[in-house]
Image (cartoon, rainbow, N blue to C red):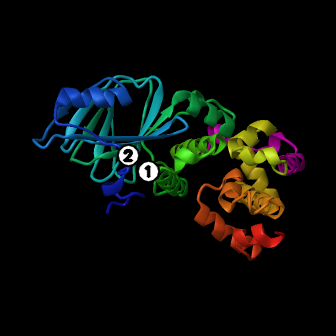
Amino acid sequence: MPSTPYAYTSVLDHLPTEESTDRDDAVEIVSRKFTPHRIDPQGERFRLTARTGDIDGVGLHHIGYGSPLTIEADPLRQRHLVCIPLWGKAVLEIGDRHWFCDPQTPMLLPPDREFRLHWLDDSPQFVVSIPNERIERVAAAMFGEPGAAIPLPPTFTLSSGAGRALAAELTLAHDDINSGAARSFPAFLSRNVAEGLVARILLGATESRRGGVYSRTAAQRPQTKLVTAFLERIASPECLESSPLQIAEQLGVPLRTLQENVQRELGVNLAEALRRNRLRAARSMLLDADPTRCSVTEVAMRCGFRHLGRFSVEYREAFGEKPSETLRLLA
């Protein structure tokens, strides 16, 4: 079992697998997913295995070749790729510079430059594919700057606080896709999951760069007015379908500014403030609902909870009873 947040034996194992032992066919399959490239296998056990899932345009992939190899790739142009070896090591080469990566050190492939990857063993890779426009929009909402203005590093670590949060978010998104649960998500929830994953990647990749765009703080705005507007915004029913990024955009501030003000004035982080608000909204809906026409699952999904078991635990901790008991309370 590697030190990654997912077992390499079961990555996207419920999804269809494309396989090939022919090099040209393997190149065609992977080029179709990412970008034209060339490969030079160094082993006799060459066999491509590729599995792909998607949630609101953000792709999760399992790519393995069964042997060490070198990949020379054209610029990605339309997307960023985050690649995590499921074991072993790899080397990213851009121009005359090299970076090493391993299961705790993802590589973030540039969209605008040719690059070369050296997979030093037969390790498969867990790959996240993000359209450039999604990176641009999420970065602008988070930092007040478009993604192009933020120098993203070729590698970063999963051992930091932001990295561990990213690993947890990757696991949840992977399980949503692999189990098929994501197919039943309403559109707003799929969007929020995808944007949350992109936001975690940006935070993990930029955690060590707390200067620059990160240095812009709430001093630019009256603090009390911002948090008051935030509380008014999340109290509206339509806000249940809004992600943290969208709420920050609606309030006209970068996400980090909103996070810092909410933490300072409410004593909880932004995610916790939104979670508590969603729980209160869920309780109100359950109290008002007709148990013959409404289910706990329906209410949980409407309030942005995508895992019913976790919702039930959190609900009981907050209100001292199961959501099903609340639903039947006034029946």
Instruction: Say what secondary structure mark 2 lies in.
Output: loop
Does the magenta portion include 259? no
Judged left or right of residue 286, residue 149 is left
Q: Where on the picture, by quarter, is residue 277?
A: bottom right
Residue 258 in view: yes
Disc 1 marks which amino acid? Asn
Q: Nearer the viewer, residue 120 or 76?
A: 76
Disc marking residue 178: 1
**Labels 1 and 2 touching (C-beta < 8 A):** yes
- Tell me the crowding category of disc 2: few under 14, some 14 to 19, or many 20 or more residues within 10 angstroms, Cα based: some
Q: Position of residue 110 (x, y in %)?
A: 43, 30
Q: Position of residue 67 (x, y in %)?
A: 18, 43
Judged left or right of residue 241, residue 36 is left
Judged left or right of residue 43, residue 83 is right
Looking at the rendered structure, the number of numbered marks drawn on it comes to 2
Instruction: Say what secondary structure mark 1 lies in.
Output: helix
Vertical placement of 287 versus 17: above or below? below
Q: Position of residue 55 (x, y in %)?
A: 52, 41
Q: Where on the picture, by quarter, is residue 99?
A: top left
State which region is magenta: 210-233
Residue 95 in view: no
| Picture quarter with the N terminus | bottom left
Q: Position of residue 18 (x, y in %)?
A: 28, 38
Question: Mark 2 or mark 1, which is nearer the start of the sequence?
Answer: 2
> Who's the residue at 84% across and 46% down the image?
233
Vertical placement of 76 versus 245: above or below? above
> Who's the residue at 24% across and 31% down the image?
26
> Who's the residue at 78% across and 51% down the image?
261
Residue under numbered circle 2: 15
Vertical placement of 101 versus 134: above or below? below
Q: Where on the picture, by quarter, is residue 29?
A: top left
Disc 2 marks which amino acid? Leu
